[in-house]
Image: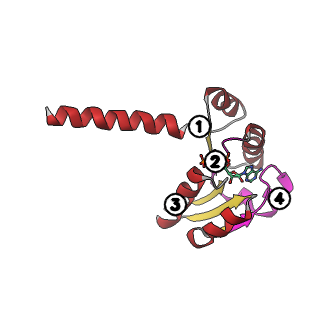
Amino acid sequence: MKKQVVVIGLGRFGTSVCKELYRLGHEVLAIDTNVDRVDYLRDYSSHAVVANATDESELKSLGVRNFDHAIVAIGDNLQASVLCTLMLKEIGIAKVWVKARDLQHQKILEKVGADKVIQPENEMGIRVAQHMHSDKIIDY
Ligand code: ATP
């Protein structure tokens, strides 16, 4: 079923999530404060908009409340990541998934209501190790 997803923060992680969701046929609204990153995603999203995701009125004017899923992919700016997550939950988005840079960040995000917290480097590291491990078993 087609989902309506807002992706906030278009670094490497947010860009990959956005492009893949769009390729899979979902409606994707891409948001970043960086004009170049937004421009790049114009062809790989339903809408790409320059906006500050810590500004509640900007988020509301973009119609974010109508989306059922949000991905917050702001890693370095802890304050922006937490504030944005809190606002998205207050606006009423059912599923808010957030990228965290470390465990401390993850704990704060869980406290403010993130539905899922992702640490991409950790998770990918585990997957790569498991992949290597299972290859070894097959080789043996
Ligand atoms: P990656 O590792 O995925 O490349 P990163 O964690 O290094 O990402 P950051 O530099 O933290 O990425 O930010 C990701 C994006 O979030 C950047 O493109 C940045 O412009 C954007 N961003 C940061 N703050 C805001 C904000 N308040 N509103 C919208 N976008 C923001």
Residue 21's disc number: 3
Verify CB contact (< 8 Å) between mark 4 and mark 1: no
Q: Position of residue 2 (x, y in %)?
A: 52, 64
Question: Which amino acid, mark 2?
Answer: Ala
The residue that mark 2 highlights is 73
Question: Which amino acid, mark 1?
Answer: Val
Verify CB contact (< 8 Å) between mark 2 and mark 1: no
Q: Which residues are magenta?
A: 48-76
Q: Which image quadrant for residue 99?
A: top right
Neighbor class of circle 3 (other Cα within 10 Å; few <14, some 14-19, many 20+) is: some
Q: Secondary structure at mark 1?
A: strand
Q: Secondary structure at mark 3?
A: helix
Residue at position x 54%, y 55% from top? 17
Residue 104, above or below 71: above
Of callouts 4 and 1, the N-terminal one: 4
The residue that mark 1 highlights is 117
Residue at position x 66%, y 42% from top? 75
